[in-house]
Image (cartoon, rainbow, N blue to C red):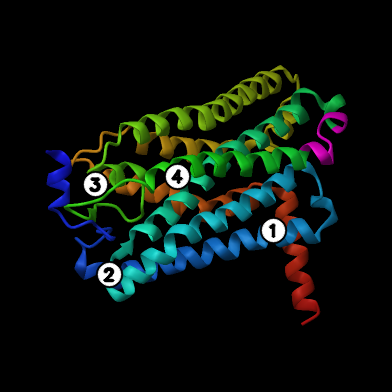
């Protein structure tokens, strides 16, 4: 009976991302706001990458991982914001099913990569603060490359498995997604196929690929904070904490908003709040990360000052 009922319905070939369509009077203002955010995100993260490549002082494991994070943030925001800008400017909120799956693939892969990359950065800070005498021997160039490559591979491996199943789902009936990007949960709700396997696999893969990095990050900072508190001098504690404070802020913002989004009940009453927190970790976090690292890092501020002085002195 179910199959025959599906057969009487038109198969969906495109979705409508409702996004911020309930705010028609603010479309132009939202477009300008998101355009500024996108430009600031690209400029800030690109500047961090250029500084790390150009300045020999930044050729260390900590800044190597930071460069990877900046590259990831550019890819991350470019997966979502251009589509939002286009829909706000033209009013066309449709996206093909294949386009939606492509966006979901990159979004899922980049989220998984960021979890692993933040864990690698936490482990690097753990070795630097808790095992300073063994740091150079343990955190070698080869090991750094392996950690970075493993982070990217892990994220996109999990996303590939999910997409291989999600792309086989049949969509019929309503095609409206009450979100500003293609996320798995609202997509699964629109399917008339049996979605139990996709849902179960999503839970398993999310646990396997995000829980261990989160626990590694958490345990690293427990050890780091414990070690810092044992340092007798106040100046020594401040110096040690300054080397990891920026990363700790980034980790807290990322995991804090991510947990709120996926633990918050997806009800009609909380839908706007759900969108706001989704916006925080997909759009706002990639923009503020370069600011956090530059404003709280004396080496980055000094490199920026020298770079600006060179540009002024040699136009």
Point out the frontmost of discs 2 and 3. 3
Residue visible at 53% across and 40% down in the picture: 112
Query: Does residue 295 show up?
Result: no
User: Is residue 117 found left or right of 274 in the rendered image?
Assistant: right
Comes first in the chain, label 1 or label 4 = 1
- Give the SS element for disc 1: helix
Q: Which segment is the magenta one?
A: 136-143
**Circle 4 sits on which residue?**
164
* Circle 2 Cα neighbour tier, 10 Å, few/some/many (<14 / 14–19 / ≥20): some
Q: Nearer the viewer, residue 278 or 161?
A: 161
CA gap, disc 1 and disc 4: 33 Å
- Give the SS element for disc 3: helix
State the mark number for residue 190.
3
Comes first in the chain, label 3 or label 1 = 1
CA gap, disc 1 and disc 2: 33 Å
**Circle 2 sits on which residue?**
27
User: Is residue 100 found left or right of 271 in the rendered image?
Assistant: right
Residue 181: give x, y in percent of width and height. 36, 55
**Circle 1 sits on which residue?**
49
Residue 187: give x, y in percent of width and height. 30, 47
Comes first in the chain, label 4 or label 3 = 4
Residue visible at 56% across and 50% down in the picture: 289
State the mark number for residue 40.
none
CA gap, disc 2 and disc 3: 26 Å
Point out the frontmost of discs 1 and 4. 4
* Circle 1 Cα neighbour tier, 10 Å, few/some/many (<14 / 14–19 / ≥20): many
Residue visible at 17% across and 47% down in the picture: 6
Figure quadrant of the C terminus = bottom right
Marks 1 & 2, CB-CB < 8 Å contact: no
Residue 90: give x, y in percent of width and height. 30, 75
User: Is residue 147 found left or right of 248 in the rendered image?
Assistant: right
């Amino acid at each position: 009976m179910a199959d025959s009922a599906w057969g009487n319905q038109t198969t969906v070939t495109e979705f409508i991302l409702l996004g911020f369509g309930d705010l028609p009077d603010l479309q132009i203002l939202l477009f300008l706001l998101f355009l500024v955010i996108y430009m600031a995100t690209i400029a800030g993260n690109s500047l961090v990458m250029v500084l790390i490549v150009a300045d020999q002082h930044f050729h260390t494991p900590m800044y190597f991982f930071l460069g990877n994070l900046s590259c990831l943030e550019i890819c991350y925001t470019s997966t979502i914001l251009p589509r939002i800008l286009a829909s706000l400017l033209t009013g066309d909120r449709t996206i093909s099913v294949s386009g939606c799956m492509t966006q979901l693939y990159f979004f899922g892969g980049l989220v998984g990569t960021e979890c692993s990359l933040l864990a690698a950065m936490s482990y690097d800070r753990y070795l630097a603060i808790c095992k300073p005498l063994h740091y150079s021997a343990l955190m070698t160039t080869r090991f750094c490359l392996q950690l970075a490559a493993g982070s990217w591979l892990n994220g996109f491996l999990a996303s590939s498995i999910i997409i291989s199943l999600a792309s086989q789902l049949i969509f019929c009936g309503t095609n409206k997604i009450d979100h500003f990007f293609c996320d798995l949960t609202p997509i699964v709700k629109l399917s008339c196929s049996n979605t139990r396997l996709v849902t179960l696999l999503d839970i398993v893969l999310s646990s396997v690929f995000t829980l261990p990095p989160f626990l590694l990050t958490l345990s690293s900072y427990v050890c780091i904070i414990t070690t810092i508190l044992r340092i007798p001098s106040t100046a020594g504690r401040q110096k040690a904490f300054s080397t990891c404070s920026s990363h700790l802020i980034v980790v807290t913002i990322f995991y804090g908003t991510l947990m709120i989004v996926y633990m918050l009940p997806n009800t009609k009453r909380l839908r706007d709040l759900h969108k706001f927190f989704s916006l925080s970790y997909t759009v706002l976090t990639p923009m503020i990360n370069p600011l956090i690292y530059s404003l709280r890092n004396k080496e980055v501020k000094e490199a920026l000052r020298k770079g600006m002085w060179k540009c002024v002195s040699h136009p």
